[in-house]
Image (cartoon, helix red, strand yellow):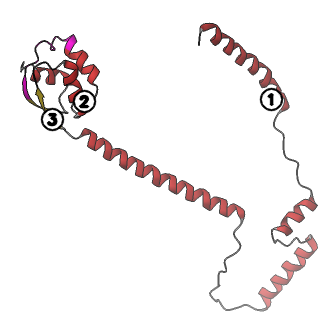
């Protein structure tokens, strides 16, 4: 993308923002219409609730109070009957279950990551055999493929920049992943 295209894109975004923002700001959020009393009654009846008038409610509470005063019952264990779960309870239960699953998944991923890091940080050893005519690039790629170094290009550049590439000696060398570029270079050039 060249400079002119980037400027036109930015200018288009700015004009779009200047048009859309005032429209949204002045239109404001639209509220849902409030349900009427008949709508509310219909919804409650649909959900198996009984709708009472104030007078019916007063009569019912008076009856309950008379029954409680007239006949005190001995304490019996009450049987709890499961009621029909409300949609909100189902949603809440599903939400809690999803959260638990997410937490378990995160714990599992963290454990796997820790195990992978532990394996990655474990010291690896490798016996490097340098033969006549091997280039620094070949040596670096062998070290990388065996887990001694992480970046073969950087190691090769290090050898060349520090003039180790001309002093590499033919032979067999024991190396490990805890060694840095300097240590590996000194070992393979026998500059201990």
Q: Element type at marker 1?
A: helix
Spatial CA distance of label 3 from label 2 is: 11 Å
| Residue 5 percent across, percent down from the top left | 64, 11
Q: Report the disc number at residue 130.
A: none
The residue under label 1 is 24
Spatial CA distance of label 1 from label 3 is: 65 Å
Quarter of the image where one finds residue 137: top left
Q: Which residues are magenta?
A: 160-172
Q: Report the disc number at residue 144.
A: 2
Task: Please tell me whether residue 165 belongs to the stretch shown in magenta.
Answer: yes
- Which quarter of the figure is the C terminus placed in? top left
Q: Is residue 10 left or right of residue 183?
A: right
The residue under label 3 is 126
Residue at the image position 90 percent from the left and 79 percent from the top: 59
Q: Element type at marker 2?
A: helix
Prevailing secondary structure of the magenta residues: loop
Q: Earlier in the sequence, mark 1 or mark 3?
A: 1
Q: Would you place residue 81 above or below residue 3 in this image?
A: below
Q: Is residue 59 left or right of residue 170?
A: right
Q: Is residue 79 left or right of residue 72?
A: left
Mark in the foreground, 1 or 2: 2
| Residue 184 percent across, percent down from the top left | 15, 24
Q: Would you place residue 127 above or below residue 134 in this image?
A: below
Q: Element type at marker 3?
A: strand
């Amino acid at each position: 993308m060249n400079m002119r295209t980037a400027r036109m894109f930015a200018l288009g975004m700015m004009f779009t923002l200047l048009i859309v923002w005032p429209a949204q700001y002045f239109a404001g959020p639209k509220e849902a219409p409030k349900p009427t009393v008949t709508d509310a009654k219909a919804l409650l009846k649909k959900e198996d609730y009984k709708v009472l008038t104030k007078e019916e409610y007063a009569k019912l509470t008076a009856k309950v109070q008379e029954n409680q005063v007239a006949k005190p019952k001995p304490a019996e264990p009450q049987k709890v009957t499961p009621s029909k779960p409300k949609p909100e309870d189902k949603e809440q239960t599903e939400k809690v279950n999803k959260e638990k699953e997410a937490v378990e998944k995160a714990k599992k991923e963290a454990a796997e990551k820790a195990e992978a890091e532990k394996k990655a940080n474990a010291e690896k050893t490798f016996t490097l055999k340098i033969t006549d005519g091997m280039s620094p690039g070949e040596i670096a790629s062998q070290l990388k493929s065996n887990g001694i170094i992480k970046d073969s290009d950087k190691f090769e550049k290090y050898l060349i920049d520090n003039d180790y590439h001309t002093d590499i000696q033919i032979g067999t060398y024991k190396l490990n992943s805890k060694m840095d570029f300097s240590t590996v270079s000194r070992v393979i050039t026998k500059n201990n």
